[in-house]
Image (cartoon, helix red, strand yellow):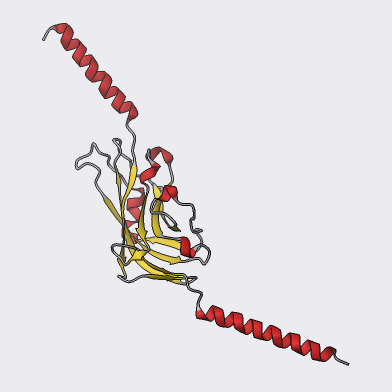
C-alpha cells in the first residue's frame, strides 16, 4: 500500500470514529415486566390489589450512563386500552397506582448503566417492586393491558422513548399476563343505592302525609 493510500485509509478511520463518538447516545430500555406473585390476580372495581413484580432495564445505546445521587427513572403503572403504550387512547389516572421499589434495588435506579460497547454489552438490571393498584370504574371494560412505564428524569440518557414500556394483557394470569379485570358493580354498591332509593321514597311519602290537612 502506497503512502497516499495509507493516509486516506487512516483519515477515513479517524472520521468514522469521530462521527460515532459525536453521535454516541445512551438509550434506556425496559426489556421486560413480570408479576412474580401472587399467581392469581383479579382487579375488581375500586379494590386495592397488591402484587410483587420485576422489571428488567438496560442501556442499549452506545454510550454509558454514569451513576449519581438522583434516580435515572421511576417506574409507573397504568391500565390502558392497547398493547402499545404509544398508541393508547384510554389511560388510567396515576391515582390508585402505587409502586414501591425494593430496598435492595433502590441503588440500581441511580446506578451505572453500561452501554452496548461495554463488556458484557448492555448488562440487564433487574428491579423488584411492590405494587398497590386499583381498577377505576371509568373505562374499566375498555382496558386491555397493565403497563409498566419508565418515567425518565433526564431526557439526555434516553434517545428512544419508544422502548420505555412493557405491557401485560388482562386476559391471562401471571407470569404470562397481568390477571383479569372485574368490571361488575359490587353488590355492596347496589345495596347502598337501593337503600338510598328506599329511604328517599319513605321520606317523600312521609312529607306528603304531613302536608295533608
Residue 40 horizontal/vertical position (percent): 32, 71
In the depicted structure, whether residue 62 falls above or below residue 92: above
Rendered location of residue 105, percent (x, y): 32, 57
Question: Furthest-left residue in view?
Answer: 1
Image location (x, y in percent) of residue 54: 31, 59
Residue at 23 percent across and 14 percent down: it is 11
Q: Is residue 161 above or below residue 39?
A: above
- Relative depth, front residue between 206 and 99: 206
- Asked if residue 13 can be seen in this view, the reply is yes
Q: Position of residue 36 (x, y in %)?
A: 29, 65
Q: Residue furthest right?
A: 213
Q: How many marks?
A: 0
Q: Report whether 32 appears left or right of 95.
A: left
Relative side of 199 to 127, left or right = right
Residue drawn where x is 85% and y is 91% of the image? 212
Report the side of 212 relative to 9 (left or right): right
Residue 126 quadrant: bottom left
Residue 144 falls in image quadrant: bottom left
Q: Residue at x 27, y 41 (%)?
A: 114
Tell me the quadrant of the picture where the C terminus can be found: bottom right
Seen in the picture, residue 99 relative to 154 is either above or below; the reply is below
Which residue lies at the image location 42% right of the left edge and 54% below the top edge? 82
The quarter of the rendered structure image containing the N terminus is: top left
Amino acid at each position: 500500500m502506497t503512502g497516499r493510500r495509507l493516509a486516506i485509509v487512516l483519515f477515513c478511520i479517524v472520521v468514522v470514529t469521530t462521527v460515532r463518538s459525536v453521535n454516541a447516545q445512551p438509550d434506556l430500555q425496559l426489556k421486560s415486566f413480570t408479576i412474580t406473585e401472587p399467581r392469581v390476580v383479579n382487579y375488581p372495581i375500586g379494590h386495592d390489589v397488591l402484587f410483587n413484580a420485576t422489571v428488567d432495564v438496560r442501556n442499549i445505546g452506545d454510550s454509558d450512563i454514569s451513576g449519581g445521587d438522583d434516580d435515572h427513572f421511576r417506574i409507573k403503572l397504568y391500565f390502558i386500552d392497547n398493547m402499545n403504550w404509544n398508541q393508547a387512547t384510554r389511560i388510567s389516572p396515576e391515582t390508585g397506582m402505587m409502586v414501591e421499589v425494593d430496598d435492595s434495588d433502590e441503588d440500581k435506579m441511580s446506578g451505572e448503566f453500561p452501554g452496548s460497547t461495554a463488556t458484557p454489552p448492555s448488562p440487564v438490571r433487574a428491579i423488584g417492586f411492590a405494587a398497590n393498584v386499583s381498577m377505576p370504574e371509568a373505562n374499566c371494560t375498555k382496558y386491555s393491558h397493565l403497563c409498566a412505564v419508565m418515567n425518565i428524569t433526564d431526557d439526555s440518557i434516553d434517545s428512544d422513548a419508544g422502548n420505555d414500556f412493557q405491557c401485560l394483557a388482562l386476559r391471562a394470569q401471571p407470569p404470562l399476563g397481568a390477571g383479569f379485570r372485574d368490571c361488575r358493580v359490587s353488590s355492596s354498591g347496589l345495596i347502598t343505592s337501593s337503600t338510598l332509593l328506599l329511604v328517599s321514597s319513605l321520606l317523600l311519602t312521609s312529607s306528603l302525609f304531613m302536608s295533608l290537612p
